[in-house]
Amino acid sequence: MSTQAPPVLQLNQVSVTYPGGHRAATKVSFSLQPGERAGLVGESGSGKSTIARTVLGLVPHSEGTLQILGKMAQDSTREARLTRARMVQMVFQDPYHSLNPRRTIRQALVEALQVSGRITEKAQLEKESIALLEKVHLDAGALNRFPHQFSGGQRQRICIARALAPNPQLLVCDEAVSALDVTTQRSIVHLLRKLSEEEHIALLFITHDIPLIEHLCERVMVLDQGSLVEDGTVESVFHNPSAPKTRQLLDSVLRIDPPQEV
Ligand SMILES: Nc1ncnc2c1ncn2[C@@H]1O[C@H](COP(=O)(O)OP(=O)(O)OP(=O)(O)O)[C@@H](O)[C@H]1O
Ligand SMILES: [Mg+2]
């Protein structure tokens, strides 16, 4: 008999109300299994980043329960807080502003490794920093350089390397490739997919770009005004959407008009 691993992430009827009373998420429920890749789409303002911030513990939820690897997110014991901080990592949209411009890549990676508590021996820190760079297809030559000496795509690879430092089980990517050109987007998405497959990392991939989801995810969820209106396999949702909002989002992708002749 096999014992089933707990979901990496489980939201049960989670609602989020911002100070001032704006309710940005209403009774959102879903769970992610280890290694599962789910896309989260929805119009601007539908609550995608709110969900991301709630999962990261940056915004509190007002109702419902949120569990990470079977542990309650409200659990404020040291162990529960450490589990969340290590197991769930975020990759942001702007790789330049999420790296300190005055610190070398070595400093950024060593700090992330030290914070993770995973590596304590000094001699190991350099080795492990290089291993992190290799995971994102950059070499040790990057260590002495500063963020501005890289392209946007390379900077995003560095952010991913840093996010991998604690050996997370979930990466939350909020518009992580939106600022990049199409070719670079594809290569980052390819990298995320490979990392997820090889290291069994679950992904919650937030984007406006539906075709990217088809490249990366097996599952897609649609948010509409803070409520989850669709959750299914990419194939079923994109070929046979049940919610009117999903149809509308798909139509907006298909309705890219050719440039007008003048
Ligand atoms: N700190 C905040 N305080 C009050 N309201 C907020 C706050 N952050 C977001 N909101 C509101 O919550 C709603 C959801 O915002 P959220 O940023 O989650 O949307 P989103 O789906 O990520 O949008 P986008 O695609 O534009 O990034 C919006 O109406 C927004 O104005
Ligand atoms: Mg957002």
Image (cartoon, rainbow, N blue to C red):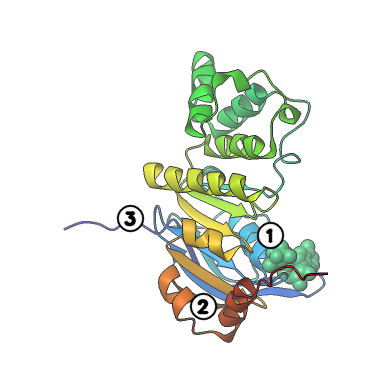
- Quadrant of the picture in which ligand 1 is shown: bottom right
Q: Where residue 189 is drawn, which disc sits there?
A: none
Which residue in the structure is indicated by mark 3? 5
Residue plotted at (56% across, 35% down): 161
The amino acid marked with disc number 2 is Glu
Which residue in the structure is indicated by mark 2? 230
Q: CA distance from mark 3 to mark 1?
A: 27 Å
Rate crowding at label 2 as few (under 14), some (14 to 19) or many (20 or more) other CA atoms within 10 Å: many
Horizontal side of 67 relative to 97 (left or right) equals: left
The amino acid marked with disc number 1 is Val
On-image quarter of the C terminus = bottom right
* 45, above or below 192, in the image: below
The picture places residue 28, in percent across and down from the top left corner, at 56, 74
Foreground tag (2 vs 1): 2
Q: Earlier in the sequence, mark 2 or mark 3?
A: 3
Which residue in the structure is indicated by mark 1? 59
What kind of element bears circle 2?
strand
Q: Indicate yes or no: mark 2 CB to ligand 1 under 8 Å.
A: no
